[in-house]
Image (cartoon, rainbow, N blue to C red):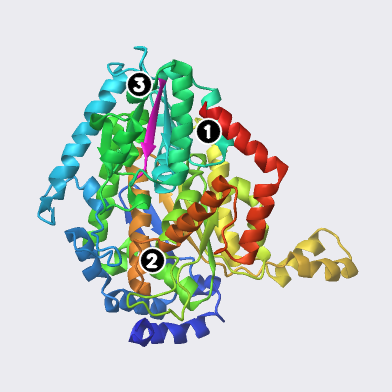
Amino acid sequence: MRTDLTSWVNLTSLAKEMKNKHISDLFNQDNDRFSNHSVQLEGLLFDYSKNLIDDRVFTELVQLIEQTEVCNWRNKMFSGEKINATENRAVLHTALRNRDASPLYVDGQDITAVVKQELSNIKEYVEQVRAGDITGSTGKAFTDVVNIGVGGSNLGPQLVTGALKSFSDNVLKVHYVSNVDGVQISETLEQLNYETTLFIVSSKTFTTVETLTNATTASTWLTKQSGAKQSIAEHFVAVSASKSNAVNFGIKPELIFNMWDWVGGRFSLWSAIGLPIVLYLGYEQFCQLLEGAHEMDLHFKNAEPENNIPMLMAAISVWNTTFLGAMAHVILPYDECLNMLPDYLQQAEMESNGKSVNWLGNVINYPTVPLIWGGTGINGQHAFYQFLHQSNQVIPADFIGSLTNKSGLENHHNTLVANMIAQAQGLMTGFDEAQVREQLSRKGLNAKDIERITPHKIHGGNRPSNMLLLDAVTPHSLGQLIALYEHKIFVQGVILGIYSFDQWGVELGKGLAQDIQNDIDKDSVTAHHDSSTRSLLAYYINHPLSKSNKVIQSANRV
């Protein structure tokens, strides 16, 4: 049991004591606190000094990493052992970016060779599309790419292409369709010319209902526009582990790129799932993304726990959540190009570690991962930072920024960085009663008004945060950053004793939705539903407005 470990017991005791301390006091007691509690790699600074951690807590967190055998589990993952035990699968997203090209065998197959071949296939295809050598059904070069997928098949590529817009040569525009709400795909298709549009359908099984619904709508639109069903073969490619299902859809076998069961969807952007990234940025830029991730892999493999950024991030997260009781964690990118990062990390962490049973299947009696949320920094300051500063909940934060000014507008970037650093400072130090009274007095308020207003302006501070500073947001540094969070999530799972690479909660919802969809399609309510679900279904099925949906659907099929 995790709770029986000496480090766990000691941390439980220390948490009670540390809750009565203030982070600012820890800085006052240690002039070297920043250097003692930060790690710098080439192009990346990780500062975790603004956490409620003293030397004793730090020592026990390192012990926790060692006693939960994080390094052993890390080695198992990299070597291809089937650590995804509930699905009997290896976990090898790291093999997708293994730039050392050293052989790695899983079930007798050299995974490195398989990945290398698939990258070669991607490179060849993308270069022909970008050069106009592969065209649509009328011979015109592609100008637009529509990526149809959901979850990891969407969020990863969308994060990367959005973050790296300035590295695109604009040969191709990329659009994303993930929501089964027809508004999204309708609005996307309205702006496109069928002759110059390429569709990517990304689904491991090629049975994901949301993805296939959107893909079918896209193929119907295409065939109506072109007047020929055969045009699907010229305008659609697939990323899937099920070639037969993709072929049945109408996609050429040679235009089906591989997914493997040893890559989880939310860790798959390094694979053919990243096809929209390669089409948008070009193959060389994609390789830089892989290089950055590989560098972080090497750091994770080789650095000692005391200086291992993913291990430290994970241990601090467990400290803040499991021991100190913070039930949420906010992601605050101070770089507009990283605006998708909170959404991406929300899925990556919560779908991985949002579990309540341990490796043995026993119910866990301690908090696992926090709720992940967030938004870009400056916008957030005028939206939800009030909650971060003065609510009665302590929400640890990750501030993420860059040193380089991309816009060319120096004052803008200086203001951006000043705000980021100031917010981290304010969350930590707060603004106590004496400071408030002095400020109000300087403004000339009388004693009565000072007494009345003071409680409303007090900020308790003592709110922890990490700071991640990149030299610049580039394909290489973005690869580093994403891989860093991937490994943090893995270490979290090991420390907590939970499996990070399955997602049975997602599967449950899919199954239930299919049953309900069948009822809607049949215009009848089956008895096996609970009374609430039966009532809602009956209301929907029998309502005149829902009847109109069927008329529209039938017309679209004609």
Q: Residues within 10 Å of mark 3 (few under 14, many from 20)?
A: some
Q: Is residue 199 magenta?
A: yes
Q: Residue 256's quadrant in the figure?
A: top left
Q: Residue 496's quadrant in the figure?
A: bottom left
The magenta region covers: 197-203
Mark 3 to mark 1: distance in Å?
21 Å
Residue drawn at x 51%, y 80% as measured from the top left: 18
Instruction: State the mark number for residue 185.
Output: 1
Mark 3 to mark 2: distance in Å?
51 Å
The three-letter amino acid code for the residue at tag 2 is: Ala
The residue identified by callout 2 is 314
Instruction: Single out the mark in the foreground, 3 or 2.
Output: 3
Instruction: Single out the mark in the foreground, 1 or 2.
Output: 1
Q: Is residue 279 above or below residue 532?
A: above
Q: Nearer the viewer, residue 318 or 349?
A: 349
Q: Is residue 130 above or below residue 305?
A: above
Asked which secondary structure carries label 3, the reply is helix
For marks 3 and 2 on the same chain, the one whose residue lies earlier in the sequence: 3
Give the dominant element type of the magenta stretch: helix, strand or loop: strand
Q: Nearer the viewer, residue 155 or 171?
A: 155
Q: Residue 448 at x, y = what percent?
A: 90, 70
For marks 1 and 2 on the same chain, the one whose residue lies earlier in the sequence: 1
The residue identified by callout 3 is 230
Instruction: State the mark number for residue 303.
Output: none
Left or right placement of residue 435 versus residue 263 in this view:
right
Asked which secondary structure carries label 1, the reply is helix
Asked which secondary structure carries label 2, the reply is helix
Residue drawn at x 35%, y 50% as measured from the top left: 265
Q: Nearer the viewer, residue 174 or 363?
A: 363
Q: Is residue 261 above or below residue 121?
A: below
- Residue 37 in sight from this viewpoint: no
